[in-house]
Image (cartoon, rainbow, N blue to C red):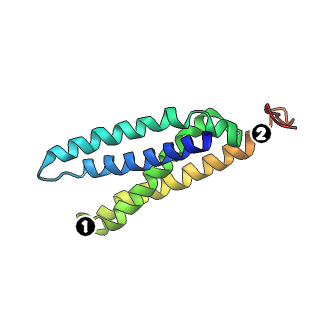
């Protein structure tokens, strides 16, 4: 059941971020943009209660790692929109999306992997046992 909720949380996060990006890109009929922003924000915010303590239980990660998928999706969307958006005609405009996108992806992956790798070791060097471990 936790895996189903986690998959639903990730799907809600990705769809919500895409809707936020689409809503932030202005069009002439601005009503749809406002709806995209509201629905996108609701989906992104629904990620947090849905994901809950999945990372803590599955990967023995600290609570702060819950935000790393948000940064990863944001970075990937910035890369995608920087590479494909027709309104960004010059390299300078594209780089305003691509450079921060690359930084967000790299930082989120490094922090996520470092947090998972070090979370099962106590600060004094002993192995931390979690309920259910043999």
Q: What percent of the width, then of the height, locates residue 67?
A: 52, 40
Q: Is residue 21 visible?
A: yes
Q: Is residue 66 left or right of residue 19?
A: right
Q: Quadrant of the N terminus?
A: top right
Q: Is residue 27 left or right of residue 61?
A: left
Q: Compared with residue 103, is residue 130 higher up or lower down, i.e. above or below?
A: above
**Number of marks present in the image shown:** 2
Q: Residue at 41% across / 40% down in the picture?
A: 44
Pointer 2 local density, CA inside 10 Å: few below 14, some 14–19, many at least 20: some
Q: Quadrant of residue 55?
A: top right
Q: Quadrant of residue 41?
A: top left
Q: What percent of the width, then of the height, locates residue 5?
A: 55, 40
Q: What percent of the width, then of the height, locates residue 72?
A: 50, 51
Q: 117 or 44: which is nearer to us?
A: 44
Q: Quadrant of the C terminus?
A: top right
Tell which residue pokes out farthest to the front in this image: 1
Q: Which of the numbered marks, if any, corresponds to residue 74? A: none
Quickly name the residue at label 2: 120
Q: Quadrant of residue 6?
A: top right
Q: Residue at 80% across / 34% down in the picture?
A: 132
Q: Which of the numbered marks, if any, corresponds to residue 86? A: 1
Q: Compared with residue 85, is residue 63 higher up or lower down, i.e. above or below?
A: above
Please say if the residues under marks 1 and 2 sit with CB atoms less than 8 Å apart.
no
Q: Is residue 52 left or right of residue 132?
A: left
**Dot 2 lies on which element?**
loop
Q: Residue at 32% across / 48% down in the picture?
A: 19
Q: Is residue 95 visible?
A: no
Q: Which numbered disc, 1 or 2, marks the residue that appears first in the sequence?
A: 1
Q: 124 or 63: which is nearer to us?
A: 63
Q: Residue at 41% across / 61% down in the picture?
A: 79
Q: What percent of the width, then of the height, locates residue 78?
A: 39, 56
**Dot 1 lies on which element?**
loop
């Amino acid at each position: 059941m936790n895996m189903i909720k986690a998959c639903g949380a990730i799907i809600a996060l990705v769809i919500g971020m895409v809707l936020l990006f689409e809503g932030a890109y202005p069009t002439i009929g601005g009503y749809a943009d406002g709806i995209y922003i509201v629905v996108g924000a609701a989906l992104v915010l629904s990620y947090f209660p849905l994901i809950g303590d999945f990372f803590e239980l599955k990967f023995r990660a600290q609570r702060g790692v819950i935000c790393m998928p948000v940064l990863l999706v944001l970075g990937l969307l910035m890369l995608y929109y920087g590479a494909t958006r027709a309104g960004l005609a010059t390299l300078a405009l594209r780089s305003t999306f691509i450079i921060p996108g690359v930084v967000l992806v790299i930082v989120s992956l490094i922090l996520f992997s470092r947090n998972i790798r070090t979370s099962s070791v106590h600060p004094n060097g002993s192995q931390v046992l979690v309920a259910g471990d043999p």
